[in-house]
Amino acid sequence: MNSQTTDCCIVGAGPAGAILALLLARQGIAVTLVEAQKDFNRAFRGDTVHAGTMELLAQLGLADALLEIPHSKLHSGKIEGPAFTEPFEVINFAELDSPYPYVTMMPQADVLTYVVGQAQRFPNFTLLLKTSATGLIEDNGVIKGITYRKGKTQGQIHATVTIAADGRASKLRAASGLDYTKLAAPMDILWLSLPRIATETIIAKGLAGRIGDGTIVLIFERPTDWQVGVVVLKGSYREVKKAGLTQFKARLAKMIPEFDATLAGLTEWRQVVPLSIELGRLKTWAKPGLLLIGDAAHTMSPVGGIGINYAIQDAVAAANALYKPLQANTLTYADLQQVQRQRQLSTRIAQRFQAVAQRQIVGRFLADDVIKPPLPARIMQRVPFIRRLLARFISYGAFPVRLAPGLRQVD
């Protein structure tokens, strides 16, 4: 069995794991980043990078380079349907007091490739792709690293601290035995990608939501295609699939007639990626030697497109708390607990917001008998200040995280 040693072993090269790895590597800390897949390409990973995250990336000196990657900008979000007399602006980011008054729509794989590429400039950083964490190494109640499998090879990584950033289906969360609570969600989303064609007239530079007949369709403008999400009742994908692809396409064509031509390219169910929506959280994010962040600690819903941003804020909070103790070899359980103390309230407020939105707005619109917008939507429609406040909350969270001064230095 292969064995290696590092200061920090991070499992999961998503936004949280990649950013934390870069932040620690820049401080001379030995970091091993473990990723089960061969690259960073995933179907329909979150592509929404909000203003608060862009400001953090700017502090790292990464924002300008990332904005050179092909992307689009979402300035506002509008919905329309029989329940509305005219298109209704749900949210407007253009009035944010930020150098980035929009949502940057950028393929997450491109972001991760760039961030990890920056980390690879440091000799103290190691990236292990196609490497699956299989368990935790524990000694007298302290986590000392992980066991892993890479092809037919098994090994161990011994670490001062292990970070579980391996997402909503976290293997390390399951191995830790920590108490994880699932919260109810009334919906799932069926994602698909449709090519751009010249005849489309969908709202430019924004998110279009079409609502009617118990169906919600979301359309995100991307540099080379449209990302379309069909919101359905929880657990109903099997019934939708049983009804047949022809009926599903007819349902889409009715909601987004602008896409009538491009829908001809939807010929197989494998082009439709179902996402089971889940909210959940750990009671305790850490145990001695182990810290969980991102969706591994608090699974977020797609509502608001905030998952990638909360994951990155967790990574920044973790770097703030851990880099000095790791440099001095004085890391304690209290240092790990500090991350949860800083981030827990903000994530719980966000999850509460998502749960209410799912139940009171999304759930209501999925009902066939809705003839007018639910009360929260009507209030937002009539009070522009609330829409501006919502934009700030979505973009920054309840309690924004800032990089510690020692982490802001750009090499």
Image (cartoon, rainbow, N blue to C red):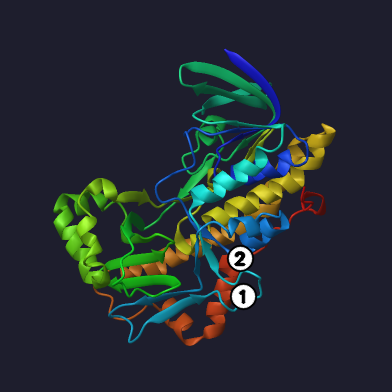
User: Does residue 282 appear in this view?
Assistant: no
324 sits left or right of 257 in the view:
right
Looking at this rendering, what residue extends furthest in the right direction?
328
**Residue sitting at x 59%, y 66%:** 395
Residue 397 x/y as whole percent: 61, 63
User: Does residue 364 appear in this view?
Assistant: yes
The amino acid type, in three-letter code, at marker 1 is Leu
The tag on residue 51 is: 2
User: Dot 2 lies on which element?
Assistant: helix
The tag on residue 164 is: none
User: Dot 1 lies on which element?
Assistant: loop
**Residue sitting at x 45%, y 43%:** 41
Residues at badges 2 and 1 in contact (C-beta under 8 Å)?
Answer: yes
Residue 336 x/y as whole percent: 71, 41
- Relative height, residue 42 to residue 92 (above, below): above
Residue 277 x/y as whole percent: 40, 52
Q: Which residue is mark 1?
A: 96
In the rendered structure, which disc, 2 or 1, sits on the residue that comes first in sequence? 2
Camera-side residue: 391 or 94?
94
Q: Whole-Å distance between the Cαs marked 2 and 1?
A: 8 Å
Residue 333 x/y as whole percent: 74, 36
The amino acid type, in three-letter code, at marker 2 is Ala
